[in-house]
Image (spheres, helix red, strand yellow):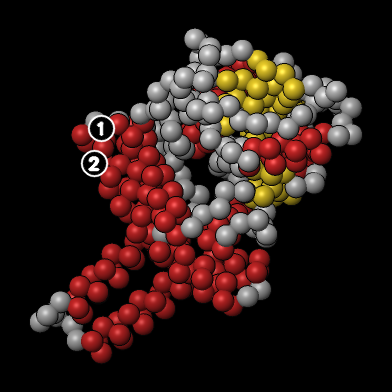
């Protein structure tokens, strides 16, 4: 069955990555008989340069839009019954788009893709981030409905039925809309065969900041939604969650060993640390076996363990900041960049710029 598509890209300061993402979509659409349109909803200070693609429309905004707002704007403008949302740093691999769309087998389905973990275009730290995300997706219980908003397909009817994305959310909008679909008894599943390259490349500083900000936002939003107990399930096995909490034992052990006249000698501390590490590795054994399955490299398993433990610290700090912001009712982190002079429209919804193929 032919399915006419509206493919929506939210964009803000996407740079050269956006062009690569759009070109990967064009390759997927090259032999498609159904109708389609590509909508780029952009609110960058400087208008992005886009490739000359068939049926490409650029929608500009005179104020910064959160990704959730940009997606909703694209959905309102969309002309076709199937919506495909793709982030502006996602490069589709061959067959990814067709697997998303073909997965819409009934009217109650949302289909999402995943990142390809063997990505030659990214940094080692980004690779471990993508591996951890894939591990989480593989452990989503069947009764849950979580999917990532980085690449997914849904009917316009069902998207409108749940009210689209919550526009006041700077992040975790995918968690929120997943919960909306679940409350409306609309099934969603992750298609592990629909893969893409995540072009965003993290270094140590940026990954720590990413975990910090997302943890801050998650705690803040979670406290706002205390009446919805299932709103922010992390979809991690309980053993993996317990490993996060062990960081407090590591810190306590460090204090007891390092401080003068502490209650523990160096030799006793090393023995205690050995037992603590053994228990920690036991808690993470399933995750580490997953890393081995994907990489077949012992050094990768070791680095994945270090990555997991290192990211615990910004998660804790971000969570504490989210709690503080909630108690103080501080929403300053939700502030947006003001209107930019090169965007001429006086309205949030702007004129359309078309890029038809000659």
- First in sequence: mark 2 vs mark 1: 2
Foreground: 65 or 58?
58
The reply, left or right, for residue 255 in relation to residue 53 is left
* Quarter of the rendering occupied by the C terminus: top right
Q: Secondary structure at mark 1?
A: loop
Residue 345: image x %, image y %?
A: 53, 12
Q: Is the residue marked by circle 2 packed among few (<14), some (14-19), or many (20+) residues within 10 Å?
A: some
The reply, left or right, for residue 225 in relation to residue 42 is left
- The residues tagged by marks 2 and 1 sit, at their Cα atoms, a distance apart of 8 Å
What is the number of the mark on residue 324? Answer: 2
Can you say whether 53 is above or below 147 in the image? above
Can you say whether 24 is above or below 117 in the image? above
What is the number of the mark on residue 330? Answer: 1
| Label pair 2/1, CB-CB below 8 angstroms | yes
Can you say whether 69 is above or below 13 in the image? above
* Picture residue at 81% right of the left edge, 38% below the top: 28
Residue 194: image x %, image y %?
A: 73, 46
Foreground: 11 or 174?
11
Residue 102 shows in the view: no
């Amino acid at each position: 069955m032919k399915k006419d598509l509206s493919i929506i890209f939210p964009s803000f300061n996407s740079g050269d990555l956006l062009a690569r993402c759009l070109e990967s979509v064009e390759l997927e659409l090259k032999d498609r008989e159904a109708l389609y349109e590509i909508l780029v909803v952009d609110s960058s200070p400087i208008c992005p340069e886009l490739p000359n693609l068939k049926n490409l429309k650029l929608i500009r905004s005179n104020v910064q839009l959160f990704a959730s707002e940009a997606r909703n704007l694209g959905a309102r403008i969309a002309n076709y019954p199937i919506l495909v949302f793709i982030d502006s740093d996602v490069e589709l691999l061959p067959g990814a788009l067709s697997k998303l769309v073909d997965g819409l087998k009934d009217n109650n389905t949302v289909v999402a893709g995943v990142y390809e973990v063997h990505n030659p275009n990214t940094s080692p730290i980004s690779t471990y981030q993508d591996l951890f995300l894939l591990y989480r997706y593989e452990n989503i219980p069947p009764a849950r409905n979580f999917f990532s908003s980085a690449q997914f397909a849904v009917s316009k009817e069902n998207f409108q039925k749940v009210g689209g994305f919550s526009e006041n959310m700077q992040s975790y909008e995918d968690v929120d809309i997943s919960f909306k679909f679940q409350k409306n008894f609309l099934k969603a599943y992750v298609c592990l065969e629909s893969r893409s390259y995540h072009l965003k490349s993290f270094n140590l500083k940026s990954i720590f900041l990413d975990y910090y900000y997302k943890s801050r936002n998650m705690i803040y939003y979670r406290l706002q939604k205390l009446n919805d107990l299932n709103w922010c399930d992390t979809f991690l096995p309980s053993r993996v969650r317990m490993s996060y909490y062990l960081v407090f034992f590591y810190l306590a052990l460090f204090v007891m060993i390092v401080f003068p006249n502490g209650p523990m000698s160096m030799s006793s501390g090393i023995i205690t640390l050995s037992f603590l590490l053994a228990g920690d590795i036991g808690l993470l054994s399933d995750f580490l076996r997953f890393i081995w399955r994907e990489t077949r490299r012992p050094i990768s398993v070791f680095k994945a363990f270090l990555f997991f433990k290192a990211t615990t610290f910004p998660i804790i700090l971000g969570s504490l900041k989210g709690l503080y912001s909630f108690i103080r009712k501080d929403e300053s982190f939700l502030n947006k960049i003001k209107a930019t002079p090169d965007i001429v429209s006086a309205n949030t919804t702007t004129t359309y710029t078309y890029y038809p193929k000659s």
